[in-house]
């Protein structure tokens, strides 16, 4: 069977499964179904526990990364997410705290050699990263080279320690629905812990519809991270209600302080 025919066959099978589902379960941070609830039941402190507090802009300074870590500690964010060159700095700042260190890998294009990504992953972990957010080889996916996409993810997974969380950024704004489904299926097959919507550097970023689709494809046990364009409490909660178990945001402080249930930290 030709590769394009195989892709079409797999896509049809997945779409058929999805059509039989008429709703998406809300998920807690642990990946288990929770009761339906209004957004107001998520307090600012609870929401902070979903957030990867992010600074990935080129030109960001040491002072900005210091502030990033201080905010993460003050508001009790889940992690800070930075480029790999800043991992040693933030890891030192956060040593002995509950805030995790997350490093992006192959960011933001995902098009570099797999061995280069794997080296960056190993180096980030050695320098103190607990979590990795890797960008898939988007061009390979869109070209139908699914073997390369899978091996790219597997190579980073092999570089991980048993305690390392691996999130796979599929860059939804560049993909068709069928490609989004394939990217999620491949990520799950390759052993990733999460799929993630976006880098935030391309296109429109996260949408509720994409989060719902990703959740339906990966099922209830795998994580889904919504990232890109999430700037307020209402949008963040909408992503969680759609199935996200992690939120990536640079404006995290504004998100939690804009909550109707904001409390003193």
Image (cartoon, rainbow, N blue to C red):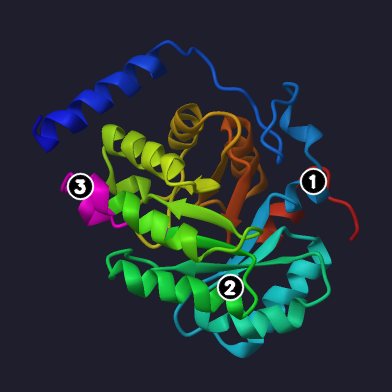
Q: Quadrant of residue 32?
A: top right
Q: Residues within 10 Å of mark 1 (few under 14, many from 20)?
A: some
Q: Earlier in the sequence, mark 1 or mark 2?
A: 1
Residue that label 1 marks: 46
Q: Is residue 251 magenta?
A: no
- Across and down, in percent, residue 80 comes to 65, 67
Q: Position of residue 167 (x, y in %)?
A: 51, 53
Q: Position of residue 75 (x, y in %)?
A: 80, 62
- Magenta stretch: includes residue 140: yes
Badge 3 local density, few (<14 within 10 Å), some, or many (20+)? some
- Residue 142: mark: 3
How many callouts does the rendering have? 3
Residue at image location 50% in from the left, 60% down from the top: 133
Closest to the observer: 100 or 119? 119
Q: Which residue is mark 2?
A: 125
Q: Is residue 185 above or below residue 152?
A: above
Where disc 1 sits, the SS reads helix
Residue furthest bottom in the image: 62
């Amino acid at each position: 069977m030709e590769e394009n025919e195989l892709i079409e066959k797999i896509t049809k099978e997945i779409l058929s499964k999805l059509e039989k589902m008429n709703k998406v379960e809300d998920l807690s941070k642990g990946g288990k179904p929770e009761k339906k609830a209004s957004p107001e039941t998520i307090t600012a402190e609870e929401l902070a526990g979903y957030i990867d507090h992010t600074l990935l802009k080129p030109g960001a300074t040491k002072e900005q990364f210091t502030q990033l870590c201080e905010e993460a500690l003050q508001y009790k964010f889940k992690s800070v997410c930075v480029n790999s060159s800043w991992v040693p700095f933030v890891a030192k700042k956060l040593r002995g705290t509950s805030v995790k260190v997350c490093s992006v890998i192959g960011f933001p294009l995902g098009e570099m050699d797999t061995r280069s990504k794997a080296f960056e992953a190993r180096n980030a972990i050695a320098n103190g990263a607990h979590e990795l957010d890797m960008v898939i080889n988007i061009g390979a996916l869109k070209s139908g080279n699914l073997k390369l996409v899978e091996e790219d993810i597997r190579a980073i997974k092999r570089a991980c320690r048993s305690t390392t969380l691996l999130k796979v950024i599929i860059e939804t704004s560049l993909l068709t629905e069928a490609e989004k489904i394939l990217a999620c299926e491949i990520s799950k097959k390759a052993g990733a812990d999460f799929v993630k919507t976006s880098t935030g550097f391309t296109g429109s970023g996260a949408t509720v519809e994409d989060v719902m689709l990703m959740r339906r494809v990966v099922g209830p046990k795998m994580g889904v991270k919504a990232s890109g364009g999430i700037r307020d409490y209402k949008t963040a909660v909408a992503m969680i209600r759609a199935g996200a178990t992690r939120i990536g945001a640079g404006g995290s402080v504004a998100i939690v302080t804009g909550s109707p249930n904001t409390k003193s930290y």
